């Protein structure tokens, strides 16, 4: 799949976990893409034919919107479904190895915690981005250490690599991680469990967009966005 590798990775990052049925997920993800999601990652729960088929459908769907599609932790599945890259929660696979399997233009990212030596490692190894997890208590089941906003601020001061923040992020706290220095926000339940995933994505995207345009999204401005007065 030849898309988006040259686009700057930032903005609204949707992480898909099996919190809905496959059919419901596809409907919600399509709505989220219509709402402006910039990057999609799929976390396969099991290595089954059903999971592989869902991944293929998600890959084709994101291609329609010219949005990068990543598979969590599985280069072989990523290759089978023609994903744009992989995301790793550990550091056993270096970016070069992943790209030898998926292609040199493939996107490779890593989950980070509080150990900023891992940040230096990811940048030096040629990762495309990192994602800090979990900034707030998550509403979907993930296993991450708590990462305070101070860690994100410290990371921003020492790197230029794209940084996302994940874990418990929603319309009420998204501005905090952006103010701390993240280039974007990674969410699951805030979109997939919303009554209107497209509207939820659009609102989150607007918060990121306003911050990117002004370099700031202070709480007063953020409240105006939520009220529809911005």
Image (cartoon, helix red, strand yellow):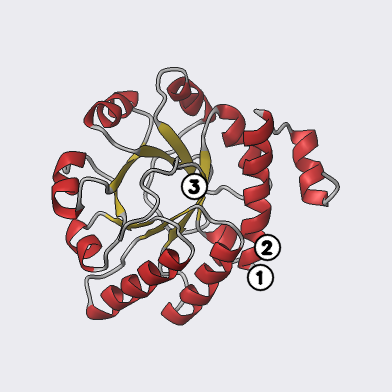
SS label for mark 1? loop
User: In this rendering, would 174 be left or right of 26?
Assistant: right
Q: Are marks 1 and 2 in contact (CB under 8 Å)?
A: yes
Which residue lies at the image location 61% right of the left edge and 66% below the top edge? Answer: 197
Label 3 and label 2: CA atoms lie apart by 20 Å
Is 164 located above or below residue 154 in the figure?
below
Q: Which residue is mark 2?
A: 199
Q: Closer to the observer: label 3 or label 1?
A: 1
Q: Which residue is mark 3?
A: 167
Residue occupying the far right of the picture: 229
SS label for mark 2? helix
Q: Report which quarter residue 82 is drawn in.
A: bottom left
Dot 3 or dot 2: first in sequence order is 3
Residue 123 image offset from top left, x and y in percent: 30, 28
* Residue situated in front as seen by the camera: 54 or 171: 54
Residue 16 image offset from top left, x and y in percent: 43, 62
Is 225 located above or below residue 83 in the figure?
above
User: In this rendering, would 20 be left or right of 217?
Assistant: left
Residue 127 image offset from top left, x and y in percent: 29, 36
Residue 18 can be seen, yes or no: yes
Q: Quadrant of the N terminus?
A: bottom left
- How packed is label 1: few (under 14 Cα within 10 Å), some, or many (20 or more)? few
Q: Closer to the observer: label 3 or label 2?
A: 2
Q: Quadrant of the C terminus?
A: top right
* Residue situated in front as seen by the camera: 189 or 110: 110
- How packed is label 2: few (under 14 Cα within 10 Å), some, or many (20 or more)? some
Q: Closer to the observer: label 1 or label 2?
A: 2
């Amino acid at each position: 799949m030849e898309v988006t590798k040259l686009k700057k990775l930032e903005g609204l990052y949707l992480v898909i976990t099996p919190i809905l049925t496959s059919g419901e997920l596809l409907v919600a993800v399509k709505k989220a893409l219509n709402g402006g999601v910039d990057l999609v990652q799929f976390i396969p729960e099991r290595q089954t034919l059903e999971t592989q088929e869902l991944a293929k459908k998600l890959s084709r769907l994101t291609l329609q919107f010219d949005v990068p599609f990543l598979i969590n932790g599985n280069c072989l599945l990523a290759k089978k479904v023609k994903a744009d890259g992989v995301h790793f929660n550990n550091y056993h696979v270096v970016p070069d190895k992943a790209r030898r399997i998926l292609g040199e233009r493939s996107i490779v990212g890593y989950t980070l915690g509080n150990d900023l030596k891992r940040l230096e490692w990811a940048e030096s190894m040629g990762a495309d981005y990192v994602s800090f997890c979990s900034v707030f208590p998550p509403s979907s089941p993930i296993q991450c250490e708590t990462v305070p906003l101070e860690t994100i601020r410290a990371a921003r001061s020492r790197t230029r690599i794209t940084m996302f923040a994940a874990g418990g992020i929603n319309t009420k706290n998204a501005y905090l991680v952006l103010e701390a220095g993240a280039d974007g926000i990674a969410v699951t339940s805030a979109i997939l469990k919303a009554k209107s995933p497209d509207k939820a994505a659009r609102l989150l995207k607007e918060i990121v967009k306003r911050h990117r345009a002004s370099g700031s999204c202070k709480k007063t401005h953020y409240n105006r966005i939520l009220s529809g007065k911005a």
